[in-house]
């Protein structure tokens, strides 16, 4: 019997439009039957093909087609119907991105295998979790078990068994009609025209528009945060039009022009309402000579300083480093999504906000809570937040306030226990989300299903105070190590991969290791030693089972010092910046066996030997405090082999008229040795160490170094450099250096 999908889809659509909500239709069963039912449903809906998007592996319909891997293209867009084909794979990140693209009154359609069997099936996403030496049969199905439970439990979700031809749940909720929105009033002291405030849908949006008035003079920044569907892009578009109507040049950037479509649509509407003519071009121009123009992020960096106002839409999807470059603009606004982990995840809110607060811009923060594109309490939003834990939060502060190393219990977070204990899962995952910029919905699936991952936590009165996510790495077969050495990739083995493929150590993948992927402590109880206590308990548990403990992260001085204090030493710094963090990534090891010690020692030695050369080349823009902290953590003493002539050159610069510029090599070897070894008797101030890094290791020009460190002139900076060399030469210099010292 043919399932009554067309009638059901029409009923769902009708109810969704009446309540200004969205509905989710699940077509579960055979894939071909699912597409047949879908085609019948689409024929019954009064929705144009241009308002429909299929997210899946194949272009099966006449509408827009987007692979799950490119789901980010839908950010900042709205669609009447979005279909997700989950038969070949269901990628949690893609699901999180497409849900927000469905407009109020629209439908999200999920094509899925039979729901009862779905958790036991393995798909392409599961294959990505099968890290050697594990295979796909070792991957669990807890994430989809939980997903199916949410589909069956949440209101507004219709499920159809297309194989049996039956409706398991019609998803109809009989909601009241959407209530009229409260009128929006223009603030009495507003500078933007009344027409802009008349165009606001909610008081929230009017408040956001008013916040943009803070960009009347710089340096100033506005940060507008909201969940999807709250109208942040619309508010930014209205503000852009107001500036353009006043004759100003407004530069807009976003991951793609499509992501800024709503911003431009609202800007165009307001300009048309005020001037009576709808701007025809993609760029919006006004009679006063103003304009709103889009440039891609790379081009926007080059033009940021010249624009009157710069607006960044979907800011969280841009790398932190690029966001920092955009701060060259004097007046800048950021519109960004929270609870969505779009693009670069929480790099914006965790890393970039710290940089913005420390800069020269006066920052105005504003958030939007009331939905615009659909009603508050929309069932699909409620379901998505629950299914993907988009709103996961750590425990409230009072629950963990008494946490201390002697008052907490160490616990393995067993995936089955997490599946059965929603509060524990939300607390642990919520702590990872708030503490780390890279946490995303796929990490929830990894936490529940990946066979190579372990999670450990410190609990206080049953609540998560600190959590660590751990990944087993190494212990690779000879053929896998050879394949990696020859350029192949082994999933889930970050440390062995870098040490093998980049640093050419084929034996690096042989010892077994445990990498700390994430570690997070509740903000209310930081600086109490809980992170260090958790690491010590992890080491005690795993020391006999692995050869090394390791970690990798975007290097900052504070993080490097924390890991060094816990016995982890640097063995590598990446030569390119991480797109998400904007930092150079550091790799650190702590051995737990003789095999691990040999691995750590040889790589620490190689790192110390190559650091002078790479610091003057690929790492020439490395923050000097990161360089200092990195070298302090290196567990190796690099050789210091200067011949008599080289010592005379160095000592001549320290005591007499010698010049660093004539032969930087011996200076660099000496500086690295001193900063790694930090021996008693070499008393350098932080400023002197920065000077040695900036000029001695990185070779930055004297005027730039003098300006950076606050010396009165390049000549004064050169004299300070010589003074900083004196204790190093006194400590390490031989007879040739002594002769120079005595002479001068």
Image (spheres, rainbow, N blue to C red):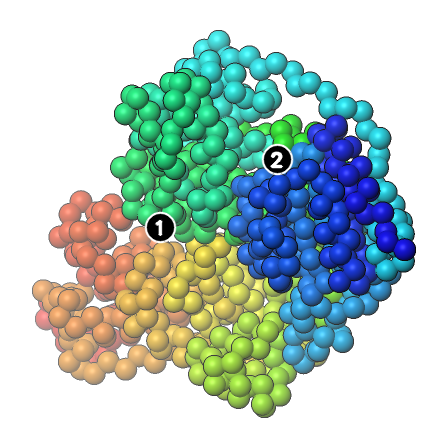
Where disc 1 sits, the SS reads: helix
Residue 734 placement, left or right of 487:
left
Residue 602 placement, left or right of 681:
right
Vertical order, 306 against 481 (above or below)? above
The residue at the point 44 percent across, 44 percent down is: 257
Vertical order, 214 against 551 (above or below)? above
Disc sitting over residue 298 in the figure: 1
Residue 672 versus residue 163: which sits nearer the camera? 163
The residue at the point 35 percent across, 22 percent down is: 245
Residue found farthest to the top: 188
* Image spot of residue 25 (x, y percent): 77, 47
The residue at the point 38 percent across, 32 percent down is: 280
Residue 634 versus residue 9: which sits nearer the camera? 9
State how far apart marks 1 and 2 are (Cα). 27 Å
Residue 611 versus residue 724: which sits nearer the camera? 611
Disc sitting over residue 254 in the figure: none
Q: Which residue is mark 2?
A: 229
Vertical order, 235 against 50 (above or below)? above
Q: Earlier in the sequence, mark 1 or mark 2?
A: 2
The residue at the point 55 percent across, 12 percent down is: 185
């Amino acid at each position: 019997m043919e399932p009554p999908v067309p009638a059901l889809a029409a009923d769902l659509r009708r109810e969704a439009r009446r309540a200004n909500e969205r509905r989710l239709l699940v077509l579960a069963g055979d894939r071909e039957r699912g597409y047949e039912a879908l085609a019948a449903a689409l024929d019954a809906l009064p929705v144009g093909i241009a308002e429909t998007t299929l997210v899946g592996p194949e272009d099966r319909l006449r509408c827009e087609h987007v692979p799950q891997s490119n789901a980010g293209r839908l950010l900042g867009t709205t669609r009447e119907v979005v279909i997700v084909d989950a038969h070949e794979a269901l990628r949690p990140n893609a699901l999180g991105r497409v849900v927000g693209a469905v407009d109020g009154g629209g439908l999200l359609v999920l094509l899925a295998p039979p729901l009862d069997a779905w958790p036991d099936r393995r798909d392409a996403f599961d294959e990505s979790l099968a890290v050697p030496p594990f295979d796909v049969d070792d991957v669990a199905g807890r994430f989809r078990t939980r997903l199916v439970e949410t589909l069956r439990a949440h209101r507004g979700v219709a499920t159809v068994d297309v194989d049996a031809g039956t409706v398991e749940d019609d998803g109809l909720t009989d909601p009241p009609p959407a209530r009229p929105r409260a009128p929006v009033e223009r603030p009495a002291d507003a500078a933007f025209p009344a027409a802009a405030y008349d165009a606001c849908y909610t008081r929230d949006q009017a408040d956001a528009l008013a916040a943009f008035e803070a960009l009347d003079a710089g340096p100033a920044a506005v940060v507008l945060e909201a969940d999807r569907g709250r109208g942040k892009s619309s508010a930014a578009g209205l503000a852009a039009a107001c500036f353009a109507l006043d004759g100003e040049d407004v530069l807009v950037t976003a991951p793609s022009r499509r992501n800024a479509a709503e911003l431009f649509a609202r800007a165009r509407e307001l300009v048309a309402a005020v001037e009576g003519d709808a701007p025809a071009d993609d760029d919006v121009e006004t009679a006063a000579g103003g304009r709103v123009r889009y440039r891609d992020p790379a081009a926007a960096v080059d033009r940021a300083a010249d624009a009157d106002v710069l607006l960044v839409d979907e800011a969280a999807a841009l790398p932190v480093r690029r966001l920092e470059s955009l701060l060259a603009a004097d007046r800048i606004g950021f519109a960004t999504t929270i609870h969505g982990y779009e693009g670069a995840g929480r790099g914006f809110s965790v890393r970039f906000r710290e940089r913005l607060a420390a800069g020269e811009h006066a920052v105005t923060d504003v958030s939007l809570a009331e939905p615009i594109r659909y009603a508050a309490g929309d069932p699909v939003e409620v379901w998505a937040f629950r299914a993907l834990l988009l709103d996961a939060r750590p425990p409230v502060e009072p629950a963990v306030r008494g946490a201390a190393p002697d008052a907490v219990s160490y616990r393995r977070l067993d995936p089955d226990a997490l599946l059965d204990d929603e509060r524990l899962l939300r607390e642990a995952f919520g702590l990872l989300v708030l503490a780390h910029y890279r946490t995303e919905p796929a990490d929830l699936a990894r936490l529940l299903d990946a066979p190579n991952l372990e999670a450990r936590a410190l609990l206080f009165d049953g609540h998560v105070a600190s959590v660590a996510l751990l990944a087993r790495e190494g212990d690779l077969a000879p053929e896998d190590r050879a394949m990696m050495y020859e350029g192949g990739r082994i999933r889930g083995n970050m440390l062995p991969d870098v040490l093998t493929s980049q640093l050419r150590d084929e034996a690096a993948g042989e010892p077994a290791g445990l990498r700390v992927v994430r570690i997070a402590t509740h903000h209310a109880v930081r600086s109490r030693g809980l992170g260090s206590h958790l690491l010590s308990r992890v080491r005690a548990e795993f020391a006999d089972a692995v050869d090394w403990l390791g970690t990798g992260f975007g290097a900052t001085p504070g993080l490097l010092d924390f890991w060094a204090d816990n016995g982890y030493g640097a063995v590598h710094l990446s030569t390119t910046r991480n797109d998400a963090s904007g930092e150079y990534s550091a790799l650190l090891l702590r051995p737990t066996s003789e095999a691990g010690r040999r691995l750590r020692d040889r790589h620490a030695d190689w790192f110390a030997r190559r650091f002078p050369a790479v610091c003057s080349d690929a790492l020439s823009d490395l923050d000097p405090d990161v360089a200092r902290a990195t070298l302090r953590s290196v567990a190796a003493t690099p050789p210091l082999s200067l011949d008599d002539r080289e010592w005379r050159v160095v000592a001549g610069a320290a005591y007499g008229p010698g010049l660093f510029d004539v032969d930087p090599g011996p200076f660099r070897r000496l500086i690295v040795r001193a900063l790694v070894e930090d021996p008693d008797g070499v008393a350098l101030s932080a400023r002197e160490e920065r000077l040695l890094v900036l000029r001695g290791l990185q070779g930055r020009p004297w005027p730039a170094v003098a300006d950076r460190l606050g010396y009165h002139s390049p000549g004064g900076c050169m004299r300070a450099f010589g003074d900083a060399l004196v204790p190093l030469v006194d400590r390490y210099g031989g007879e040739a250096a002594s002769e120079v010292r005595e002479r001068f």
